Image: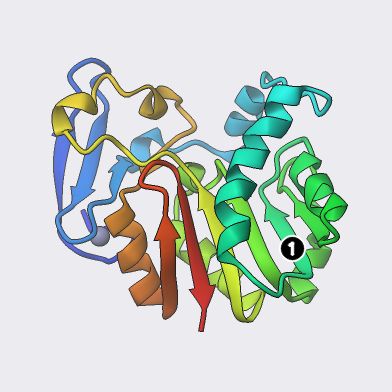
């Protein structure tokens, strides 16, 4: 199968525990589930509706704070932001607003107002979104068009374990709505293909890019 990210050659492997078929790119290291396991938005929504993200929950706030602790020291001149794929909660956008960054939030299921499409932003954040996408490269390119020049996209998604023996026991790919799994190298290749700069990652689950 052709790679979702770089159109490179992939090889196929089967997870012994689940029997799920995966493809891994030999060029960019992305791993993705075979398209037969991809779900529609409605199927995904049924699962998301079970999530309880209480905005008053200090743990949920701290979770976003860890993300911003990675992002904010690496950016400058950020006056506007978009939280793309925020889910039910606008909490991350609200936290950014409290930091004097004018932030919008968009989610195809819960906050479907597409007004963001006509705006430009200094920072686009997208947490726990990219692992759900059938076509992450197309969305990444779209997000780049919404950025002002020299500004930033920051993503959060768990990087898969480096040791292939650890993949089967890794919790993250067991969620049926998670279909694409990244390594830092995948994001470096994506940045090259899309013509933006790879700024940094935390070698765990966060990555930041800068538009040229
Ligand atoms: Zn690839």
Does residue 104 sit above or below 32 in this rendering? below
Number of numbered discs on residues:
1
Asked if disc 1 is less than 8 Å from ligand 1, the answer is no
Residue sitting at the far top = 17
Percent across and percent down for residue 116 are 78, 66
Lateral position of residue 68 relative to residue 121, left or right? left
At x 84% / y 46%, what residue is drawn? 94
Measuring from the top left, give residue 78's x and y in whole percent.
72, 70
Find ligand 1 in the image and state its quadrant. bottom left
> Image point 60% across, 40% down: which residue?
66
Q: Is residue 53 visible?
A: no
User: Is residue 172 something that shows in the picture?
Assistant: yes
- 142 left or right of 193 in image: right
| Label 1 SS | strand
Dividing the picture into quarters, in which one does residue 56 lie?
A: top right
* Above or below: residue 91 compared with residue 55: below
x and y, in percent, of residue 192 in the image = 34, 75
**Residue at 86 percent of width and 60 percent of height:** 100
The image quadrant that residue 125 belongs to is bottom right
- Where 39 falls versus 101 (above or below)? above
In the picture of the structure, the residue carrying the numbered disc 1 is 81
Residue at position x 38%, y 43% in the image: 180
Crowd tier of the residue under label 1, counting other residues whose Cα lies within 10 Å: few below 14, some 14–19, many 20 or above: many
Residue 35 locus on image (x, y percent): 35, 42
Depth check, front residue: 190 or 4 = 190
């Amino acid at each position: 199968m052709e790679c979702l990210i770089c159109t490179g050659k992939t090889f196929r492997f089967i997870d012994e525990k689940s029997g799920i078929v995966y493809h891994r790119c030999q060029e960019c290291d992305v791993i993705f589930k075979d398209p037969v396991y991809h779900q529609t938005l409605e199927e995904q929504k049924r699962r998301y509706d079970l999530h309880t993200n209480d905005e008053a929950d200090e743990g949920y706030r701290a979770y976003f704070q860890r993300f911003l602790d990675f992002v904010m020291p690496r950016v400058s001149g950020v006056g506007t932001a978009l939280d793309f794929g925020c889910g039910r909660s606008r909490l991350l956008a609200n936290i950014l607003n409290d930091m004097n960054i004018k932030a919008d939030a968009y989610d195809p299921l819960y906050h479907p107002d597409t007004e963001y499409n006509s705006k430009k932003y200094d920072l686009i954040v997208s947490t726990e979104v990219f692992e759900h996408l059938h076509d992450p490269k197309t969305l990444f390119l779209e997000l780049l068009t919404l950025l002002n020049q020299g500004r930033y996209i920051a993503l959060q998604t768990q990087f898969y374990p480096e040791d292939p023996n650890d993949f089967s026991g890794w919790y993250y790919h067991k969620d049926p709505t998670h279909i694409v799994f990244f390594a830092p190298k995948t994001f470096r290749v994506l940045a090259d293909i899309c013509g933006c700069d790879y700024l940094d990652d935390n070698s765990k689950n966060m990555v930041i890019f800068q538009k040229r």
